[in-house]
Amino acid sequence: MNVPVELFTAGTYSKTTGDHSRLVMRNDLQQEGRQPEEMDLEDLLEAYKQLLEQKNALEMRVRKGEERRRALMHILSDLNKVNRKLNDQRKAMIHILADYEQDRSRLAKQTERQDDSRRALMHILQDSHQSNLRLENSRKAMIEGDD
């Protein structure tokens, strides 16, 4: 049974399967000595089967592409979360370092005040010692003067 057809496809190369399309092409039919309008039912069924295979392969590629896109979106979402956490940790570290610097400055001032107090106490003790020495010398001088 011969059925007239006007639909022909150009040859394609599939990256997924690595082979060329097996669709019946105008040149193939002309080489066989038949006109494109002379395709019989078997040729049409074979062409239809090959078109379905191509359609399924393309749908699979689209599904895989969509899965990759979704995976990439998850990765980007995870990266965004990690970046937010890192940013929060960075801010916390800045606050911790600022508090540390304030504590260090406060301790340095406190140490300086303690050193000043220690020096003042040393001067007081030295003055007291010198006063005691003068008093002792004065007492000795009075005792020697009484003799």
Image (cartoon, grey):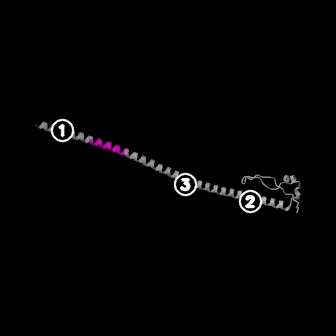
Q: Is residue 112 left or right of residue 71?
A: left
Whether tag 3 and tag 2 are in contact, CB under 8 A, the answer is: no
What's the CA distance linking mark 3 and mark 1? 78 Å
Residue that extends furthest to the bottom in the rendered view of this protein: 1
Pointer 1 residue = 138
In the drawing, does residue 32 fall left or right of residue 131?
A: right
Around disc 3, counting alpha carbons within 10 Å, would you say few (fewer than 14), some (14 to 19), or many (20 or more)?
few
Label 1 crowd (10 A; few <14 / some 14-19 / many >=20): few
Mark 2 nearby-residue class (10 Å; few <14, some 14–19, many ≥20): few
Residue found at x 73% / y 57%: 57
Tell me how far mark 3 sits from mark 2, CA to CA. Answer: 43 Å
- Residue 96's tag is none
Q: Which quarter shows the C terminus? A: top left
Question: In the rendering, which numbered label is found on residue 56?
Answer: 2
| Count of picture labels | 3
Residue 88 shown in magenta:
no
Specify which label sits upstream in the sequence, 1 or 2. 2
Q: Nearer the viewer, mark 3 or mark 2?
A: 2
From the image, state whether disc 3 or disc 1 is nearer to you: 3
- Rounded to the nearest angstrom, the CA distance separating label 1 from label 2 is 120 Å
Would you name the residue on which mark 3 appears?
Answer: 85
First in sequence, mark 3 or 1: give its number: 3
Task: Report x, y in % for residue 119.
Answer: 32, 42
Residue at 23%, 40% (x, y): give it. 131
The range drawn in magenta is 112-125
Q: Amino acid at mark 3?
A: Lys
Corner quadrant of residue 44 = bottom right
Amino acid of disc 1:
Ser
